[in-house]
Image (cartoon, helix red, strand yellow):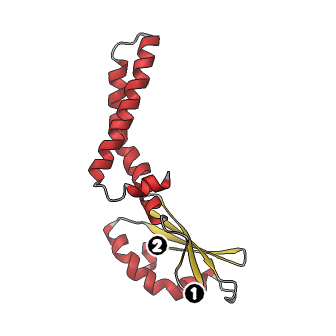
Amino acid sequence: MDWLLAGLIDLPSWVIHGLVGAILGGLGGLIGGALQRVLRIPHLASVLAVVGAVASTQVTKSVVIPRIITASLNADLPKKGDEVTTIVRIDYDGRRYVYHYELDDSLPNVTAETMKTGLLSDLCAHWKPEFAAGRVNGADYNYRLRGEVISFTIEPSDCP
């Protein structure tokens, strides 16, 4: 299913909103039609079709578009970032990114604070415009090294 979602990334958002609205409105109408016959409530099919279509805006923004972005980001993963780092997966919920990496076992033990300090300048150069525009509220970085996870978070306050 992710390959199908990843294929939708190039569509304009209004098309995605329209597709989700049509699907949810259609489902509302089908369910309402079945219930209307059983419960004998007039116009139930029409009411549930409208409810489905209206609900589609939030569903599209909160669920569908983040799933499409996540599927697209992961389409060619896992992938080597450099000789010691493999990016395994990226998650996105609409406001926050979560990166999952595996580090080569040849690396010495490192702490989350050491990783964050070493990467902060480059990460802030990338994230500061996103934070300033209000598109993203943070990014989590998870590095697996010899079975242990080293994690840190980048927040707007890290990039003044």
Using the rendered view, name the quadrant where residue 32 is placed: top left
Q: Residue at x 49, y 68 (%)?
A: 76
Query: Residue 20 appears at what percent x and percent y?
Result: 36, 42
**Left or right: where 63 falls relative to 83:** left
**Left or right: where 96 falls relative to 146:** left
Q: Residue at x 63, y 80 (%)?
A: 103
**Residue 61 can be seen, yes or no:** yes
Mark 1 surroundings: few (<14), some (14-19) or many (≥20) residues within 10 A: few
As drawn, 1 above or below 75: above
Mark 2 surroundings: few (<14), some (14-19) or many (≥20) residues within 10 A: some
**Left or right: where 87 falls relative to 127:** right
Three-letter code for the amino acid on which mark 1 is drawn: Glu
For label 1, the residue is 83
Q: Residue at x 41, y 15 (%)?
A: 36
Query: Residue 9 appears at what percent x and percent y?
Result: 36, 58
Q: Residue at x 33, y 39 (%)?
A: 21
**Residue 160 can be seen, yes or no:** no
Marker disc for residue 49: none
Three-letter code for the amino acid on which mark 2 is drawn: Glu
Q: Quadrant of the C terminus?
A: bottom left
As drawn, 73 above or below 65: below
Query: Residue 143 appears at what percent x and percent y?
Result: 61, 76
For label 2, the residue is 155
Comparing 84 with 119, the one in front is 84
What secondary structure is found at the residue carrying circle 1? loop
What secondary structure is found at the residue carrying circle 2? loop
Query: Residue 148 appears at what percent x and percent y?
Result: 71, 75
Q: Residue furthest top?
A: 40
